[in-house]
Image: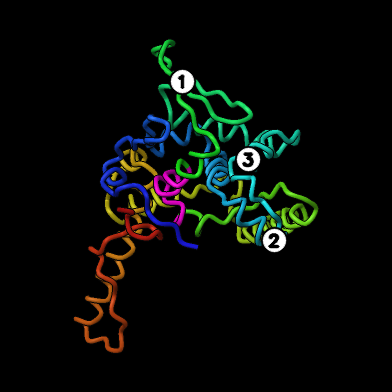
Amino acid sequence: MKKGQVVHKLYLDTKTDIPFIPAQISIYQPSIKEICLLNEANFLLAVNALTRDYIQEIKTEDNSDLTEYKNFDILMSIIKEKTDNSKRIFYSIFGLLELIFPNYNIQFSPISILFQDKNDKNAEIKMIDKDSFDDFTDILYDMFGLAELMGGGQQDYNPMGDRARALVEKFKQKRELLAQLKRQRGEDTENNSVFGRYINILAIGEHKDKNILTNYSVYQLIEEFKRFQLKETFDYTFQARMAGATNLKDAQDWMQEITLGVENVKE
């Protein structure tokens, strides 16, 4: 299901801090260079865990009654599990929160995520809880262009019951098969980088310094890459027609509005 865009594009295009009104706090948009400090794999794991619609998925798979629960409750249950996977999820989420809230010390309580101003110990503690969590993750979904980056936010961790654990195992098997196919093609699966691939293509295609591109936010990088693809297709189609080619499908207007797979901005 497509999500509606909740962050105005002006914030995303200009890499401006995004206000999160329910918690009276602003969300910093980190650069690709800063995300590298967290580690790209940990970043992807964190946004996966934070933005997943657990409630809908569990209802779909198990037809469970989750009336009293919200996505925040499910995420907290994952974090509390004493497994290597849950520990990695927790530390990845914690690292991401430190990245996007650089002016705050962060603590987890059983019912909320707490933010204490680093420069003012007497300031009111900010909080994201089960009632504001989904609004927060909707912002992350837009901010990191997840509709494009993750193909609609497909994730692979489900904490509920034997049926769900069986699904997790299937996902693991699928990942192992894909990794094996990549190794057979000679690809280095350990050092593959989604952002690095975007940067390398744009650096050549647009004649840009890679160091400049690493200062982009995730949204800026993905949006520019998508527009670059449209421009390349548009130019190729135009040049082919000038050379006499026929029966070519019209290329999309490369100057069209780009929303990275989500609907229009909410009023």
In this image, 93 relative to 58: left or right? left
Residue type (three-letter) at the residue carrying disc 3: Asp
Give the residues in magenta: 137-148
Label 3 neighbour load within 10 Å: few <14, some 14-19, many 20+: some
The answer to whether 76 is drawn above or below residue 193 in the figure is: above
Residue at disc 2, secondary structure: helix
Tell me which residue sits at (29%, 43%) in the image. Answer: 11
Residue type (three-letter) at the residue carrying disc 2: Glu
Q: Which residue is mark 1?
A: 125
- Badge number at residue 73: 3
The answer to whether one can see residue 30 in this image is no
The answer to whether 100 is drawn above or below residue 260 in the figure is: above
Residue at disc 3, secondary structure: helix
The answer to whether one can see residue 46 in this image is yes
The answer to whether 195 is drawn above or below residue 124 in the figure is: below
Q: Which residue is mark 2?
A: 61
